[in-house]
Amino acid sequence: MVRVGVIGTGMIGQDHIRRMTQVLAGVRVAAVTDVDASVAAAVAEKVGATAHATGEDLVADPEVDAIVVCSWGPTHEQYVLASIAAGKPVFCEKPLATTQEACLRIVEAEVAHGSRLVQVGYMRRYDAAYRALKKVVDSGELGAPLMMHCAHRNASVPPHYTKDMAITDTAVHEIDMVRWMFGEEIAAARVLVPRRSANGGELQDPLFLVLEMASGALVDVEISVNIRYGYDIRGEVVGESGTAALGELSPISVRAAGRFATPVPLDWRERFLAAYDVEFQEWIASIAGGGAPVGPSAWDGYAAAVVSDAAVAALDSGDRVAVVLAEKPKLYLEATS
């Protein structure tokens, strides 16, 4: 039984606690903490966990085997570094850290430790449709992949959402996914700015992100975050000898009132609920008995941050911006899930 401590008991933290207490096997939520102590105390009482005053106290708890970080993004670095220093596996919701420099410090700390402890919460890799698509790509059936067309559409976004967040909060999932899908790094980014949607107010929406892969393959990502009709994620790989695409949005179709309809998910929680379950169950299985995580690594978190910075610079300048990564440590050279 893996005893987990959760740092951050907001919406995503509580959802992961629900997942670990009601859905998954081989795990127990042993401790929680939050900047709002009253919320942490209420959650702790509900699941029979210990409430700690700080994240550092939770990491140091001998009754905690592994850490889940779901706190505010700027705090991720300190809690992940504390977990590494304690030698405990740590699952960190994205972003790994809020700057590429902070991500690199985490990479360096993990390399100094000598083995993997960190997994980053990029759940697209655990979605059944994306896994099926990657299986086709890896089989060689399509020949060499030449392009991928993606769409990331949100019905709406909150008032605090800024133009940079279209890259750093939204398209970052595609940034990680295509590195995994193609098994290679991203070499450069460009952003094209279409006609502005009236639904976005002052926000520049939509955007069209173009990623150049190291092999020369091209990936385009339509980012539409106020499209109203629902949450719609699309992806199609174009190879030398064929194409493969993600399936329909819904497992059902409805015929009624003279219309044929496929329901559209309302938000990311509905679309990727099963992927989150698989992600956490596989993480738990990988670290049980002292094992190391095999999912998205600290290097993946760092690479996503560098590409995101390049894409934001491309958005601001209108230019093609090269992606410049540090040398990849040997620790991360083995393939991940």
Image: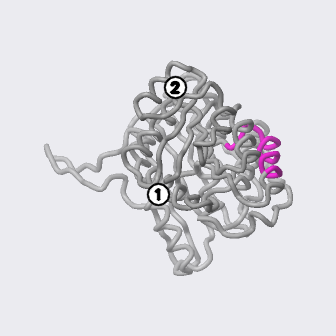
The amino acid type, in three-letter code, at marker 2 is Ala
Residue ID at (43%, 28%): 45
Q: Is residue 101 found inside the magenta-colored segment of the image?
A: yes
Q: Is residue 85 above or below residue 54?
A: below
- Whether residue 190 is visible: no
- Give x and y (percent) for residue 239: 57, 73
Q: Which residue is the site of mark 1? A: 127
The magenta segment is 96-109
Q: Nearer the viewer, residue 113 or 157?
A: 113
What secondary structure is marked by label 2? helix
Indicate which disc residue 290 carries: none
The quarter of the displayed image where residue 289 is located: bottom right
Indicate which disc residue 40 carries: 2
Q: Is residue 302 found inside the magenta-colored segment of the image?
A: no
The answer to whether the residues at label 1 and label 2 have Cβ atoms under 8 Å apart is no
- Give x and y (percent) for residue 138: 57, 75
Q: Nearer the viewer, residue 131 or 90?
A: 90
The secondary structure that dominates the magenta segment is helix
- Give x and y (percent) for residue 152: 52, 46
Q: Is residue 106 above or below residue 7?
A: below
User: Residue extending furthest front?
Assistant: 62
Q: Nearer the viewer, mark 1 or mark 2?
A: 2
The amino acid type, in three-letter code, at marker 1 is Asp
